[in-house]
Amino acid sequence: MRELDDTDRTILAALVRDGRRSYSDIGDEVGLSGPAVSDRVSRLQELGVLQRFTVDVDRSQLAGGTPVLVELETTPTAVDALRATVAESEAVEYVLTTAEASVAAVARVDGPVEAWVGRVAETAAAEDPVADYAVTLLSSAEWAPTPSGTEFALSCAECGNTVTSEGESAEIGGQRYRFCCENCLTTFRERHERIEEGAD
Protein backbone atom coordinates (compact mmCIF):
# COMPACT_ATOMS: atom_id res chain seq x y z
CA MET A 1 0.00 0.00 0.00
CA ARG A 2 1.27 3.46 -0.91
CA GLU A 3 1.87 5.79 2.03
CA LEU A 4 0.69 9.40 1.85
CA ASP A 5 3.55 11.86 1.41
CA ASP A 6 3.76 15.59 2.15
CA THR A 7 2.62 16.46 -1.39
CA ASP A 8 -0.51 14.30 -1.00
CA ARG A 9 -1.27 16.01 2.31
CA THR A 10 -0.82 19.47 0.81
CA ILE A 11 -3.13 18.57 -2.09
CA LEU A 12 -5.74 17.26 0.35
CA ALA A 13 -5.48 20.38 2.49
CA ALA A 14 -5.93 22.57 -0.60
CA LEU A 15 -9.03 20.62 -1.64
CA VAL A 16 -10.48 20.80 1.89
CA ARG A 17 -10.12 24.59 1.82
CA ASP A 18 -11.63 24.87 -1.67
CA GLY A 19 -12.73 21.82 -3.62
CA ARG A 20 -13.14 23.93 -6.77
CA ARG A 21 -9.48 24.95 -7.05
CA SER A 22 -7.97 24.03 -10.37
CA TYR A 23 -5.29 21.35 -10.48
CA SER A 24 -2.88 23.80 -12.10
CA ASP A 25 -3.42 26.25 -9.22
CA ILE A 26 -2.77 23.47 -6.68
CA GLY A 27 0.20 22.38 -8.78
CA ASP A 28 1.75 25.84 -8.38
CA GLU A 29 1.50 25.38 -4.61
CA VAL A 30 3.10 21.92 -4.54
CA GLY A 31 5.55 22.25 -7.43
CA LEU A 32 3.80 19.87 -9.85
CA SER A 33 2.01 20.26 -13.17
CA GLY A 34 -1.78 20.24 -13.32
CA PRO A 35 -1.85 16.73 -14.89
CA ALA A 36 0.50 15.42 -12.16
CA VAL A 37 -1.88 16.78 -9.50
CA SER A 38 -4.78 15.16 -11.36
CA ASP A 39 -2.93 11.81 -11.26
CA ARG A 40 -2.37 12.15 -7.52
CA VAL A 41 -6.03 13.02 -6.93
CA SER A 42 -7.03 9.93 -8.94
CA ARG A 43 -4.75 7.74 -6.81
CA LEU A 44 -6.20 9.26 -3.62
CA GLN A 45 -9.67 8.39 -4.92
CA GLU A 46 -8.57 4.81 -5.70
CA LEU A 47 -7.23 4.49 -2.15
CA GLY A 48 -10.58 5.68 -0.81
CA VAL A 49 -8.99 8.71 0.90
CA LEU A 50 -10.96 11.05 -1.38
CA GLN A 51 -14.46 9.69 -1.78
CA ARG A 52 -16.32 12.57 -3.38
CA PHE A 53 -16.33 16.29 -3.96
CA THR A 54 -19.26 18.06 -2.32
CA VAL A 55 -20.73 21.47 -1.73
CA ASP A 56 -20.92 22.63 1.90
CA VAL A 57 -24.25 24.46 2.12
CA ASP A 58 -25.14 26.48 5.21
CA ARG A 59 -28.73 25.30 5.51
CA SER A 60 -29.45 27.82 8.24
CA GLN A 61 -29.28 30.49 5.52
CA LEU A 62 -31.77 28.69 3.30
CA ALA A 63 -34.33 26.91 5.43
CA GLY A 64 -36.09 26.96 8.73
CA GLY A 65 -36.46 24.09 11.12
CA THR A 66 -35.09 23.36 14.54
CA PRO A 67 -31.37 22.46 14.66
CA VAL A 68 -30.98 19.21 16.60
CA LEU A 69 -28.55 16.40 17.30
CA VAL A 70 -30.44 13.11 17.09
CA GLU A 71 -28.88 9.88 18.37
CA LEU A 72 -30.64 6.70 17.26
CA GLU A 73 -29.87 3.28 18.73
CA THR A 74 -30.49 0.12 16.73
CA THR A 75 -29.06 -3.38 16.31
CA PRO A 76 -25.68 -4.03 14.63
CA THR A 77 -27.44 -5.69 11.69
CA ALA A 78 -29.69 -2.67 11.07
CA VAL A 79 -27.16 0.14 11.49
CA ASP A 80 -26.25 0.35 7.77
CA ALA A 81 -29.89 0.57 6.69
CA LEU A 82 -30.59 3.18 9.36
CA ARG A 83 -27.54 5.27 8.40
CA ALA A 84 -28.54 5.19 4.71
CA THR A 85 -32.12 6.23 5.50
CA VAL A 86 -31.04 9.04 7.81
CA ALA A 87 -28.55 10.32 5.22
CA GLU A 88 -31.31 10.50 2.57
CA SER A 89 -33.51 12.77 4.69
CA GLU A 90 -33.56 16.35 3.43
CA ALA A 91 -33.42 17.58 7.04
CA VAL A 92 -30.02 15.97 7.69
CA GLU A 93 -26.74 17.85 7.35
CA TYR A 94 -24.26 15.32 8.83
CA VAL A 95 -24.45 11.63 9.73
CA LEU A 96 -22.11 9.71 12.05
CA THR A 97 -22.10 6.05 13.10
CA THR A 98 -20.60 4.53 16.23
CA ALA A 99 -19.23 1.11 17.05
CA GLU A 100 -22.10 0.71 19.55
CA ALA A 101 -24.73 0.36 16.79
CA SER A 102 -26.01 3.91 16.89
CA VAL A 103 -26.42 6.60 14.29
CA ALA A 104 -26.12 10.31 15.11
CA ALA A 105 -27.34 13.08 12.84
CA VAL A 106 -27.23 16.84 12.86
CA ALA A 107 -30.49 17.97 11.29
CA ARG A 108 -32.86 20.90 10.90
CA VAL A 109 -36.28 19.41 11.51
CA ASP A 110 -39.58 21.11 10.65
CA GLY A 111 -42.33 20.12 13.03
CA PRO A 112 -42.14 17.65 15.92
CA VAL A 113 -38.78 15.84 16.07
CA GLU A 114 -40.49 12.69 17.40
CA ALA A 115 -42.61 12.47 14.23
CA TRP A 116 -39.48 12.81 12.06
CA VAL A 117 -37.69 10.07 14.04
CA GLY A 118 -40.76 7.85 13.64
CA ARG A 119 -40.73 8.29 9.85
CA VAL A 120 -37.00 7.54 9.69
CA ALA A 121 -37.41 4.42 11.85
CA GLU A 122 -40.27 3.09 9.72
CA THR A 123 -38.38 3.64 6.48
CA ALA A 124 -35.05 2.20 7.71
CA ALA A 125 -36.05 -1.27 8.80
CA ALA A 126 -39.49 -2.40 9.90
CA GLU A 127 -38.08 -5.64 11.33
CA ASP A 128 -35.30 -3.85 13.26
CA PRO A 129 -36.85 -0.62 14.49
CA VAL A 130 -34.99 2.07 16.34
CA ALA A 131 -34.52 0.77 19.90
CA ASP A 132 -34.17 4.20 21.49
CA TYR A 133 -33.31 7.76 20.59
CA ALA A 134 -32.22 11.00 22.19
CA VAL A 135 -32.66 14.55 20.90
CA THR A 136 -30.46 17.49 21.85
CA LEU A 137 -31.36 21.02 20.80
CA LEU A 138 -28.39 22.76 19.15
CA SER A 139 -27.53 26.44 19.24
CA SER A 140 -25.22 25.97 16.24
CA ALA A 141 -23.48 23.33 14.16
CA GLU A 142 -20.35 23.85 12.12
CA TRP A 143 -18.06 21.47 10.25
CA ALA A 144 -14.55 22.88 10.46
CA PRO A 145 -11.83 20.42 9.40
CA THR A 146 -8.29 21.41 10.24
CA PRO A 147 -6.08 20.41 7.34
CA SER A 148 -3.04 19.20 9.26
CA GLY A 149 -0.61 16.43 8.44
CA THR A 150 -1.91 14.15 11.16
CA GLU A 151 -5.48 14.50 9.95
CA PHE A 152 -4.52 13.10 6.56
CA ALA A 153 -2.64 10.08 7.86
CA LEU A 154 -4.42 6.82 7.08
CA SER A 155 -5.71 5.08 10.21
CA CYS A 156 -6.15 1.37 10.73
CA ALA A 157 -9.86 0.46 10.80
CA GLU A 158 -9.18 -2.12 13.51
CA CYS A 159 -6.72 -0.60 15.99
CA GLY A 160 -6.47 3.07 14.94
CA ASN A 161 -2.70 3.03 14.34
CA THR A 162 -1.25 4.90 11.38
CA VAL A 163 -1.18 2.84 8.19
CA THR A 164 2.26 2.86 6.55
CA SER A 165 3.36 1.64 3.14
CA GLU A 166 3.44 -1.90 4.59
CA GLY A 167 -0.27 -1.74 5.45
CA GLU A 168 -3.16 -3.59 3.86
CA SER A 169 -6.28 -2.42 2.07
CA ALA A 170 -9.45 -4.49 1.56
CA GLU A 171 -13.05 -4.08 0.51
CA ILE A 172 -15.35 -5.58 3.14
CA GLY A 173 -19.11 -5.33 3.03
CA GLY A 174 -18.98 -2.98 0.04
CA GLN A 175 -16.70 -0.47 1.75
CA ARG A 176 -12.92 0.01 1.47
CA TYR A 177 -10.93 -0.21 4.72
CA ARG A 178 -7.23 0.24 5.49
CA PHE A 179 -5.24 -1.74 8.06
CA CYS A 180 -1.77 -1.38 9.57
CA CYS A 181 -1.05 -5.14 9.33
CA GLU A 182 -2.42 -8.48 8.19
CA ASN A 183 -3.49 -9.38 11.76
CA CYS A 184 -5.78 -6.35 12.01
CA LEU A 185 -7.25 -7.10 8.58
CA THR A 186 -7.97 -10.71 9.58
CA THR A 187 -9.49 -9.72 12.95
CA PHE A 188 -11.71 -7.08 11.33
CA ARG A 189 -12.82 -9.39 8.50
CA GLU A 190 -13.64 -12.27 10.88
CA ARG A 191 -15.70 -9.97 13.14
CA HIS A 192 -17.56 -8.60 10.11
CA GLU A 193 -18.31 -12.14 8.92
CA ARG A 194 -19.63 -13.12 12.39
CA ILE A 195 -21.92 -10.09 12.39
CA GLU A 196 -23.13 -10.94 8.88
CA GLU A 197 -23.79 -14.58 9.89
CA GLY A 198 -25.76 -13.37 12.91
CA ALA A 199 -27.96 -11.36 10.54
CA ASP A 200 -29.06 -14.51 8.69
Image (cartoon, rainbow, N blue to C red):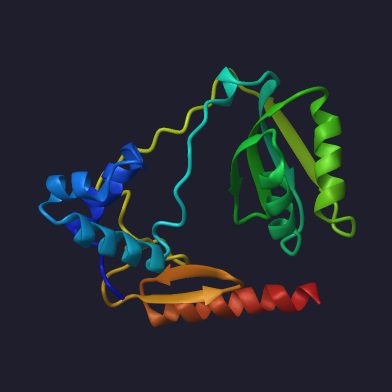
The image shows residue 108, relative to residue 157, as above or below, that is above
Q: Residue at x 38, y 61 (%)?
A: 155
The quarter of the image holding the N terminus is bottom left
The answer to whether residue 85 of the structure is visible from this angle is yes
Taking 177 as reference, is 199 left or right? right
**Along the line of sight, which residue is nearer the eye, 10 or 196?**
10
Residue shown at 24% from the left, 52% from the top = 9
Q: Position of residue 97 (x, y in %)?
A: 61, 50
| Residue pictured at 49% horizontal, 69% vertical | 176
- Count every numbered label the image shows and give the total: 0
Q: Residue furthest left?
A: 31
> In which quarter of the view is residue 47 placed?
bottom left
Give the camera-side residue of 154 and 92: 92
Quadrant where the C terminus sits is bottom right
**Does residue 22 appear left or right of residue 101 in this picture?**
left
Q: Quadrant of residue 65?
A: top right
Image vertical order of residue 102 relative to residue 106, above or below: below
| Residue 188 appearing in the image | no
Q: Is residue 131 left or right of residue 11?
A: right
Residue 79 is situated, as x and y percent measured from the top left of the image, at 71, 57
- Name the residue rendered at 47%, 68% in the picture: 177
**Front-most of 157 and 65?**
65
Residue 135 in the image, given as x and y percentages of width and height: 72, 30
Determine whether 74 is above or below 185 in the image.
Answer: above
